[in-house]
Amino acid sequence: MAALLLLLAAVSFDKSLPEVKAESTDITDVSYPEHALFDLEHRTTEPPLLVKATVSYSDAEPSYFLLVTIFDLESGDAVRGRGSGAPEPCKSSTTYASCLIGIGSSSGIEFVEFSIAGFKPTMSLAIIAVLLDGTGSMIYESESDYEFAITMTSSLVLSIRVPSTVSVSVDGVPQREGNVWLNLIPGFHKISIPDTAQLDNVTRLKFERWSDGVDETNRTIQLGQGTMLAAIYAMQYLFRATSSEGNVTETGWYDEGSNATFSVPSTTMPMNGVVGLLGGEWKFQGWYENGELQTNSINGSIIMRQPHSLIARWEPGYTLPVLVFTIAVLTLIIASMRTKLWKTLCKKTNRDQKGSHMV
């Protein structure tokens, strides 16, 4: 195989067949990356330098071979890499972007793919297909070629570490959620991350700062070397404290481990309406969460290690209205009794006066 590649690379057309046939090849549907980034640190390209082509042949003998190779037009050498073919596979594996295929029919189509390992700023290339006879000699009239170029730009790695639920945008392009690893050209680049990332209705992440101390979610960096940045987020929990009396509604997000405070104005609150005018009041019973008493103090604090929702419970107090009502009833009863007694006295007086006149 190496001898065949050297023979083809040197283009030493010293073979002539006694009978010239119409053997031919044709290269179509060539695909390749016109531009690629070359990672200076890891010596790799993004995207990988993959060249694909469809190669057809005709008027071949069953003992022939199809050889497809990628050459560097500047040096004339076969490009280093690796090749594969389908439906017929390459007969051997080499360190060149080349594929030698055994032909089983007079005509057919092969789909070849090459991975190129060269890293020049501009690569002027040609993919060449040729038929070989049973002895390994080239049939020159069957040769076909397709020229193309790949331009590469040196790049640097930008690595951004974020929580798995955070999405990063680089130069206006949204990336997948979680850590990002990109090959970028040297220079200025814009990075954007969200200020908050909601985990559920009562839990979220809140941006604090970057690992280099910058505290802005939208920033521009100058990439002059491989760079790793980490976005630091704090876990936050939602706190709610509500009370039907005193018009208390306290809601807020708190960092994990911080203290959330809560309070109501007093241990008693006047009732509305007539009952309130009569002295009815609500008596504070305590702060409850999930049906369990947390504290019977009107104010307090709680360490936020998880979401919390507190509700103030009140018990109605009717002592004063009942007393007022009782006094009022008694007053009416006494007044009624006095009225009845007065009427009785008046009737008796009238009877006595009538009796004296008769005497």
Image (cartoon, rainbow, N blue to C red):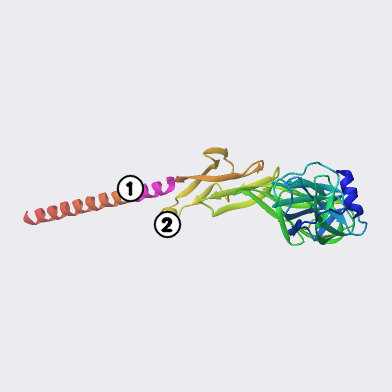
Q: Residue furthest front?
A: 18
Q: Is residue 130 left or right of residue 225?
A: left
What is the number of the mark on residue 330? 1
Question: Under tag 1, what secondary structure?
Answer: helix
* Residue at horizontal 37 percent and vertical 49 percent from the top: 325
Residue numbers of the magenta segment: 317-330
Can you say whether 319 is above or below 127 in the image? above
Residue 24: x and y, percent?
76, 57
**Tag 2–tag 1 contact (CB < 8 Å):** no
* Residue at horizontal 62 percent and vertical 44 percent from the top: 307
- Callout 1 crowding tier (Cα within 10 Å): few <14, some 14–19, many ≥20: few
Residue 178: x and y, percent?
72, 48
Q: Amino acid at mark 1?
A: Leu
Question: Label 2, label 1: how many angstroms apart (C-alpha)?
Answer: 23 Å
* Residue matched to label 2: 273
* Residue at horizontal 93 percent and vertical 56 percent from the top: 75
One can see residue 222 in this view: no
